[in-house]
Image (cartoon, rainbow, N blue to C red):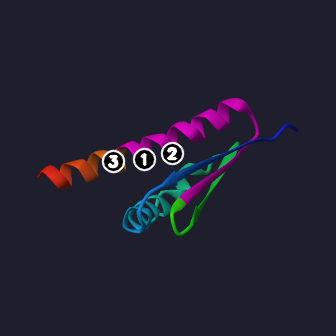
Amino acid sequence: MKTYKATISQYSNQKNINDIYRCLIAEKENLKTARSECDIIKHQDHIEFKIVAEDATALRASLNSISRYLVIYDKIKKLLKTG
């Protein structure tokens, strides 16, 4: 069985890292599927998303999900600044 792996790192200040981590750790179970799983690791200056998948399609789907969550976080942050 082939294993596909990817790591995404999101760098930011400590407050944003804490906010992103709190939001996404609650969604961690939604990132787990029958063919892939994702670990979320918080560091001082960044968050790492480590994805392991059985195939390229499952890997791409997990990457898209994480990207979508990060885009939503950015949009909410901008709305709170302007609102």
Circles 1, 3 touching at the beta carbon (< 8 Å): yes
Q: Position of residue 58 (x, y in %)?
A: 66, 36
Left of 26 or right of it: where is 5? right
Distance (Cα) linking label 2 and label 3:
13 Å
User: Which SS class for mark 1?
Assistant: helix
Q: Earlier in the sequence, mark 2 or mark 3?
A: 2
Between residue 3 and residue 47, name the one nearer to us: 47
Q: Write down the residue under mark 3.
A: 74
Specify the amino acid type for callout 2: Ile
**According to the image, label 1 marks what residue?**
70
Q: Which residue is mark 2?
A: 66
Q: Amino acid at mark 3?
A: Asp
| Cα distance between the residues tagged 1 and 3 | 6 Å
Q: Is the residue marked by circle 1 packed among few (<14), some (14-19), or many (20+) residues within 10 Å? A: some
Percent from the top left, x then y, of residue 25? Answer: 50, 63
Q: Quadrant of residue 35?
A: top right
Tell me whether the residue at label 2 lies in contact with that at label 1, contact meaning CB atoms closer than 8 angstroms: yes
Looking at the image, residue 63 lies above or below residue 28 = above
Q: Which residues are magenta?
A: 47-71
